Amino acid sequence: MSQIHDLAAPYVLGSLDADERLAFEEHLESCPACQGTVAELGDGLAAMALADAIEPPPELRKVVLEGVEPAGPEPVASIPKRRSWLRVLAPVAAVAALVLATVSILSADPVQEIAAAPDAMTIDLVTTQAYPGTPPSVATVVFSPSLEAAFVDFDGLAPLDLDRTYQIWLIGDNDPIPAGIFTPDRNGVAEVPVDGLATPDQTLGITEEPQGGSTAPTGEVLFAAEFSP
């Protein structure tokens, strides 16, 4: 186990296991320094999260308030010192964790982040002769050089058998780098971030591979685009 004082941050974030949490809570009872650190971290996390948070819908507020039981006065003498401290800390840590989780869920959309980049560019994916049937109505890659990130956008992409998948490759001077697998929905729609750093000197290729993907391409390239059109 790491030094007991170093557990303050993971304690506030709720990332300790049961034994570590119990040991730290016992230490916390008699350590003013850790008590101050934990309180400051809890307040800081809540403040940072709330700074970027959006106004929650009324329904969310109602659900949260319904789950909170009114706190009435309790006999101080019946509460041990450690439990008294933890009663004060728990709401701070819980609120910080809830707000951080909510903001993370609302903002964690790499496709929107790439599309909103000032230098984002949309590049047509060339459909090769190896692709069966009618080309998709939409086959593009959106690329942001500043973010070194991209995502592919399809509409009307042909479905595959259950044991097959589409796989993205980043192709440069060396061997192709696997950069994600995906399956379109029943309408052939797919918006998939490229799993890896995309740079202007690369070409993006898409092949059909066995379910789970391959370490190197086994199928022919179905779609391709250079990041510098």
Image (cartoon, rainbow, N blue to C red):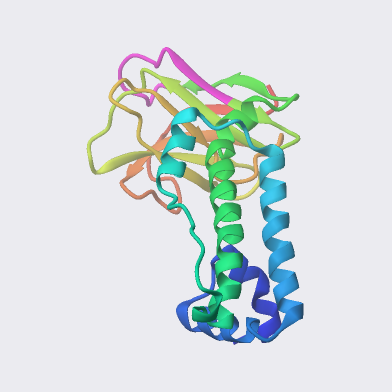
Q: In the rendered view, does 140 fall on the left or right side of 199? A: left
Q: Residue at x 69, y 31 (%)?
A: 144
Q: Position of residue 36 (x, y in %)?
A: 75, 71
Q: In the rendered view, does 221 fall on the left or right side of 89? A: left
Pick the front one: 78 or 174: 78
Q: How many marks?
A: 0
43 relative to 82, above or below? above
36 relative to 184, above or below? below
| Residue 148 visible somewhere in the drawing | no
Q: Position of residue 4 (x, y in %)?
A: 66, 85
Pick the front one: 114 or 134: 114
Work out which quarter of the rendered image holds the N terminus and state it: bottom right
Q: Position of residue 153 (x, y in %)?
A: 49, 24
Q: Residue at x 49, y 36 (%)?
A: 61
Magenta extent? 129-141
Q: Quadrant of residue 62?
A: top left
Name the magenta segment's main secondary structure: loop
Is residue 140 covered in magenta? Answer: yes
